[in-house]
Amino acid sequence: MPRRVSLPGASELFRPTQAAEPEPAAAPDPATTARPTDRPADPSRGSGRVRHDEKITVYVSSDELVALEQARLTLRAEHGMAVDRGRIVREAIAALLADLQAQGGHSELVRRLSQP
């Protein structure tokens, strides 16, 4: 006859390990506390590997997705850079926006969007 093993319940697994009310910590000095910014320090650069609060969905063709993946693999194989597709896209966006800001109507973005 098989024996049933008794496992701990949820209340035993998730019981508090500290006192119910910890002592209040000293308030941080507002002058020395770093504030998160809405934009990266250098707007001409992508935000890199940080936790992002905003998300968009972009639909691309299968050819565009293959080209993006090939670019990622080229960066890894030829340049030793292990980056994900999202970072490549963020860098591309940052580069185009910086070009738009610097060149205005003569930017690559305006030129491409003006084509039929």
Image (tube, helix red, strand yellow):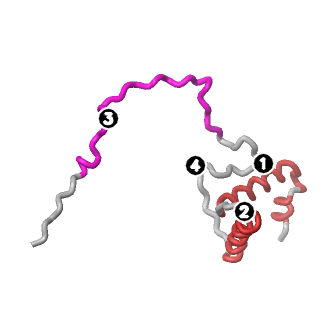
* Residue placed under numbered mark 3 in the picture: 18
Q: Nearer the viewer, mark 3 or mark 4?
A: 3
Crowding at label 2, few (<14), some or many (≥20) Cα neighbours within 10 Å? few
Q: Residues within 10 Å of mark 1 (few under 14, many from 20)?
A: some
Q: Residue at x 83, y 65 (%)?
A: 112
Residue bounds of the magenta highlight = 10-37
SS for tag 1?
loop
Question: Disc 3 versus disc 2: distance between alpha carbons?
Answer: 46 Å
- The residue to which callout 2 is attached is 80
Element at label 2: loop
Q: Secondary structure at mark 3?
A: loop
Q: Quadrant of the N terminus?
A: bottom left
The reply to whether the magenta stretch includes residue 95 is no
Which quadrant of the figure contains the C terminus?
A: bottom right
Q: Give amino acid for label 4.
A: Asp
Q: Residue at x 64, y 64 (%)?
A: 58
CA–CA distance between discs 1 and 2?
Answer: 23 Å
Which of marks 4 and 3 precedes in the sequence? 3
Q: In front of the other: label 3 or label 2?
A: 2
What mark, if any, has residue 53 been given in the picture?
4
Mark nearer the N terminus (3 vs 2):
3
In the rendered view, tell whether residue 13 sits above or below residue 58: above
Q: Earlier in the sequence, mark 1 or mark 2?
A: 1
Q: CA distance from mark 2 to mark 4?
A: 28 Å
**Amino acid type of the residue tagged 3 in the rendering:** Gln
Q: Are marks 4 and 1 in contact (CB under 8 Å)?
A: no
Closer to viewer: mark 1 or mark 3: 3
Considering only order in the chain, which callout, 4 or 2, is on the residue closer to the N terminus?
4
* Mark 3 Cα-neighbour bin, 10 Å: few <14, some 14–19, many ≥20: few
